[in-house]
Image (cartoon, helix red, strand yellow):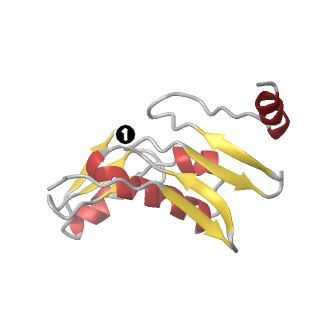
Amino acid sequence: RMLSSQTPTIVAKDGHVVLITGSPGGRTIINTVICIVLNMLEFGMTLPDAVSAPRIHHQWFPDRLQLERMTSPPHAGLEGPLVSRGHQVLNRQSQGSAHSIAWQPELETWIGVADYRRGGRPAAINRAELENLSTSK
């Protein structure tokens, strides 16, 4: 059996795509993706903020909670209260690498964000350039 899942994710709202994301990372893939989706849709973060925000991971076995950058906000100060409630808490320096694209309605355009955890950069081509390329052949 595979120990990993793939979770390429396309999120639509009112019939229109608003977010495309995904991540490598083995057992952390699903938690990485859900952190970005929740950060944008529930917590109102911009895509750059949602991608760069610290992430959490728990996979049941082993029964431990892993907090990315545990000594930095928003995770700073959580270890003590969680341990006192019986949780095993670990710090992880990095989790996943979720390169993502989101629709920005106020700008009427797409924005791409490369996750700093792996490097790279977003790249795009505008529609007019794409049409020029396809007609020049």
* Left or right: 43, with 4 as reference point: right
Q: Residue at x 81, y 36 (%)?
A: 131
Question: Total label count?
Answer: 1
Q: Residues within 10 Å of mark 1 (few under 14, many from 20)?
A: some
- Mark 1 is on which residue type? Ser
* Left or right: 134, with 128 as reference point: left
Q: Is residue 18 visible?
A: yes
Residue 98: horizontal and vertical position, in percent?
48, 45
Q: Residue at x 44, y 45 (%)?
A: 72
- The image shows residue 133, relative to residue 31, as above or below, that is above
Provide the secondary structure element on which disc 1 rests. Answer: loop
Q: Is residue 77 visible?
A: no
Q: Which residue is mark 1?
A: 94
What is the quadrant of residue 96 in the picture?
Answer: top left
60 or 26: nearer the viewer = 26
* Left or right: 98, with 128 as reference point: left
* Left or right: 135, with 46 as reference point: right
Q: Residue at x 14, y 56 (%)?
A: 1
Quarter holding the C terminus is top right
120 or 125: nearer the viewer = 125
Q: Residue at x 53, y 44 (%)?
A: 52
- The image shows residue 102, relative to residue 115, as above or below, that is below
In the image, farthest residue toward the front? 137
Residue 64: horizontal and vertical position, in percent?
20, 58
What is the quadrant of residue 40 in the picture?
Answer: bottom right
Residue 121: horizontal and vertical position, in percent?
59, 29
Residue 87: horizontal and vertical position, in percent?
21, 64
